[in-house]
């Protein structure tokens, strides 16, 4: 039975719950907007990285750098799209 | 087809490896799809018109349950892939069934949430904010719904044909899709709900 529950996956799950709990502090504590956003940005991106490496097995085959390259490039594009638009439409720069 | 036994079953042929890489390319495109939805949401989230704002309609309890259920389903499908790699078909199928059931629970809560919003006067046509909120949440929910059908179809194939390079490959690719939906949900949870209630 125990061979069905590898340590790596259980640790990954526990860590993802801890990150969710950490993100919840922005709801229960009275943080400033900047502090709250800092907490959310860190917990969300660490959580995404955790899923990518632990659960999606992104780094285990020999095409790992093509996969990581592709995903990181798209994340960069996504961030440019989101923050570029905010810069123009919301922050009036 | 040449089968390489040093690799896990889902990677064991050249075609399998390419299928998995192809799916990563698709997921990268999905990142952009959700990026544009988030972009529009952030741009329009304060345009509430005469309708309610996020802080007025968001409730922490159902959102927390949805998050916990989806995180757990991501964990159980990870265990399913692990069971598949050690050749335990029955355990793998059990974990996949649990995953799909959790997906169904998630969907139930999300539909209930939508019905609540509509009763509170936040429909797709109320304001720019509610339109973008429902489009973003709805796109994710639609992906989960599609995943339920896809996952069920794969389970039926595994049951009928056993763990072959083809069925293992399909199961693994489905697990990638499911984890991706969990990642998207984490961003919805953080930057739509928690940010809105902060």
Image (cartoon, grey):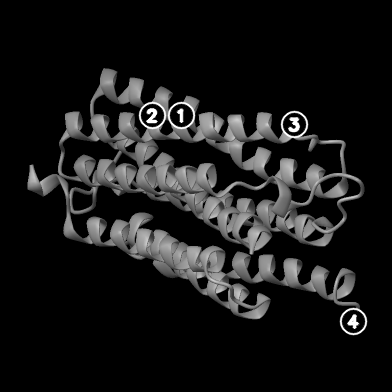
Direction from residue A61 to residue B34 in the image, left or right: right
Q: For the view shown, which residue lies furthest in the top direction?
A: B160
**In the picture, residue B137 is in which quadrant?**
top right
Residue at the (75%, 67%) spot, across then down: A81
Compared to residue B130, the image places residue A72 above or below, namely below
Q: Which mark is residue B118?
A: 3
* Mark 3 crowd level (few <14, some 14–19, many ≥20, 10 Å Cα): some
Residue at the (72%, 49%) spot, across then down: B56
Label 3 – label 4 distance at C-alpha: 36 Å
Query: Badge 1 sits on which subunit?
Result: B
Label 4 – label 1 distance at C-alpha: 44 Å
Direction from residue A28 to residue B75 in the image, left or right: left
Q: Position of residue B119 (x, y in %)?
A: 74, 29
Mark 2 lies on residue = B101
Are the residues at dot 1 and dot 2 in contact (C-beta closer than 8 Å)? yes
Query: Badge 3 sits on which subunit?
Result: B
Name the N-terminal-most of marks 1 and 3: 1
Q: Which mark is residue B104?
A: 1
Quadrant housing the C terminus of chain B: bottom right
Residue at the (82%, 61%) spot, across then down: B43
Along the line of sight, the residue nearer the viewer: B189 or B139: B189
Do the dots labelled 3 and 4 sit on one chain? Answer: no
Are the residues at dot 3 and dot 4 in contact (C-beta closer than 8 Å)? no
């Amino acid at each position: 039975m125990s061979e069905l529950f590898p340590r790596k996956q259980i640790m990954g799950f526990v860590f993802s719950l801890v990150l969710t709990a950490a993100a919840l502090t922005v709801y229960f504590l009275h943080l400033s907007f900047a502090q709250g956003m800092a907490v959310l940005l860190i917990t969300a991106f660490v959580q995404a990285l955790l899923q990518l490496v632990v659960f999606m097995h992104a780094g285990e085959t020999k095409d790992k750098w093509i996969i990581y390259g592709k995903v990181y490039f798209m994340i960069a594009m996504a961030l440019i799209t989101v923050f570029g638009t905010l810069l123009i439409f919301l922050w009036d720069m | 087809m040449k089968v390489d036994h040093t690799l896990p079953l889902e990677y064991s042929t050249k075609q399998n490896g390419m299928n998995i890489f192809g799916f990563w390319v698709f997921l990268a495109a999905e990142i952009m799809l959700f990026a544009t939805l988030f972009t529009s949401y952030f741009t329009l989230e304060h345009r509430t018109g005469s309708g309610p704002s996020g802080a007025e309609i968001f409730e922490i309890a159902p959102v927390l349950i949805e998050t916990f259920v989806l995180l757990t389903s991501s964990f159980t499908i990870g265990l399913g892939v692990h069971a598949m790699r050690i050749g335990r078909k029955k355990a793998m199928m059990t974990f996949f069934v649990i995953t799909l059931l959790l997906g169904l629970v998630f969907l139930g809560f999300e539909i209930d949430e939508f019905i609540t919003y509509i009763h509170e006067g936040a429909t797709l046509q109320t304001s720019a904010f509610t339109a973008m909120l429902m489009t973003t949440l709805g796109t994710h929910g639609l992906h989960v719904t599609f995943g339920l059908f896809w996952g069920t179809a794969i389970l039926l194939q595994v049951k009928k044909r056993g763990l072959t390079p083809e069925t293992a490959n399909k199961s693994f690719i489905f697990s990638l899709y499911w984890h991706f939906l969990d990642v998207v949900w984490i961003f919805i949870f953080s930057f739509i709900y928690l940010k809105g209630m902060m």
